[in-house]
Amino acid sequence: MRKFLTALIVIPLGLILVAFAVANRHFVTVSFDPFISDDPSLSLTLPLFMLLILVAALGVFAGGSAVWFGQRRWRRTARRNDAEARTARAELADLRAQTAAAKPESLRLPVPSGMGLYGPVGRDKQRATL
């Protein structure tokens, strides 16, 4: 379903982009020199559709970068929480190993005999593994 919806959006957008590119093939000069407008030293001549597509791509890149930099605090917090969780899991495993080794044999649970209420331990009535 997701591929269908993606195709439903991407195909019409692609057709619109191609139609826009065919309709706006004339060349324009973009000047980056604000002082000399007659013969600018910093200028670029390219088709209008290419200019608009490049400006849109630059806007998407700038917006994505701004969002990425804005979320750095949350990524840092997630990394810190992940490291703390790993440390806590390792400490818990060590504590469990220490308590299991320190527990006297008489307080340990007995090993199952192999037969439960419905047959071998770990299986239900239909013999599926639990």
Image (cartoon, helix red, strand yellow):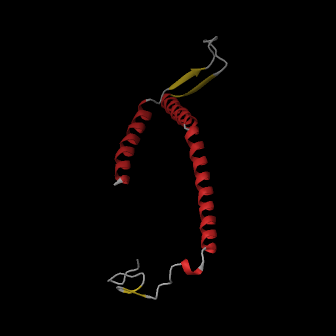
- Which quarter of the figure is the C terminus placed in? bottom left
Where residue 107 appears, as percent x and y from the top left, is 54, 77
Is 118 rendered above or below residue 4? below
What is the tally of numbered marks visible in this picture? 0
Residue 79: x and y in percent read 60, 48
Percent of width and height locating residue 83: 62, 52
Quadrant position of the N terminus in the picture = bottom left
In the foreground, 125 or 49:
125
**Residue at 39% of width from left, 45% of height from top?**
10
- Looking at the image, residue 112 sits to the left or right of residue 43; the answer is left
Q: Is residue 81 placed above or below 98 in the rendered structure?
A: above
Question: Residue 69 appears in which quarter of the rendering?
Answer: top right
Q: Is residue 23 left or right of residue 95?
A: left
Q: Position of residue 68 (x, y in %)?
A: 56, 38
| Residue sitting nearer the eye, 129 or 59 | 129
Q: Nearer the viewer, residue 114 or 75?
A: 114
Query: Left or right of 65: which side holds 12?
Result: left
User: Is 2 situated above or below 63?
Assistant: below
Q: Nearer the viewer, residue 118 or 1?
A: 118
On the image, which quarter does residue 102 sit in?
bottom right
Direction right: furthest residue: 41
